[in-house]
Image: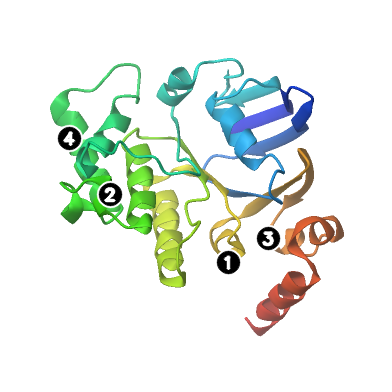
Amino acid sequence: MSLLSGRKVSVQFGGVCALSEVDFHVDRGEVVGLIGPNGAGKTTMLNAISGLCRCTGALQFDGKTISGLKPHKIARMGIARTFQVVRPFGHLTAIENVAVGAMFSGKSIPHKAEILNRAKDALEWTGLYAKRDLLPRQLTLSERQRLEMARALTMKPVLLLLDEVMAGLNHNEIDKMIELINRINSSLGVTIIVVEHVMKAIMSVCRRIIVLQFGKKIGDGSPSEIVNSPDVIQAYLGKRFAERHSKSVERA
């Protein structure tokens, strides 16, 4: 049984169909990429999964229906996420920001000592423990992105939804983020869905990739299958990327 599955998932905003009858699944332990052009429906998909927008169709997580549930109830079931636009609480320190996440894990709020321990662990995991007492404005963009991930980790997620956590980062920062995502998956056993435009990252961390265009699924397969799909090349990757990727695979 898949950890997460969706059948005919659709989201309508007035006259705009952001998602149209999308079928998908995510198996336990997978890292799945979700790619597509701007406006394809990627963030809308994460919003539907996490309960931030209403959808039609069926969404199931760990054998339970989550369609129509409130975001906090879905979070307590083990789904955590980051957001494309990082908006930490500006008046709280890094460790206080991260501690907020622990309050939305499990069926009840943990004791204060447990919350702080989780926050410290998450900051250590993301390399931010030395900056635990700083305010968000004192952190770099890369550090604020990792702060967002640390807050999600305090929720002890079974499934982690990452929405463009590498946007605006340089090559060195992207490499560190790739390493962090791989460690979260392999060492903590967290299943991950990654929305990302940085194809180097998608190819490095994802075992399977789902492609959306205009709210519809146009591809679902391994990285090699996706980069060689005529529909995906035409809609998103382009011939140059596919040729470049094929040559790098041949050299390897």
Can residue 1 be seen from the camera position used here? no
Which quadrant would the N terminus be assigned to in this image? top right
Mark 4 residue crowding within 10 angstroms, few (<14) / some (14–19) / many (20+): some
Q: Earlier in the sequence, mark 4 or mark 1?
A: 4
The residue identified by callout 1 is 200
Q: Nearer the viewer, residue 51 or 249?
A: 51
The residue identified by callout 4 is 116
Residue depicted at 17% across the width and 55% down the height = 130
Q: Earlier in the sequence, mark 2 or mark 4?
A: 4
Q: Amino acid at mark 1?
A: Lys
**CA–CA distance between discs 3 and 4?**
39 Å
**CA–CA distance between discs 1 and 2?**
29 Å
Residue 80 locus on image (x, y percent): 44, 34
Pointers 1 and 3 in contact (CB under 8 A)? no
Q: Amino acid at mark 4?
A: Leu
Give the foreground label among 3 and 2.
2
The residue identified by callout 2 is 137
Mark 1 residue crowding within 10 angstroms, few (<14) / some (14–19) / many (20+): some
Can residue 112 be seen from the camera position used here? yes
SS of the residue under disc 2: helix
Q: Quadrant of residue 48?
A: top right
In the displayed structure, 185 sits above or below 214; it is below
Give the foreground label among 1 and 2.
2
Q: Earlier in the sequence, mark 3 or mark 2?
A: 2
Disc marking residue 223: 3
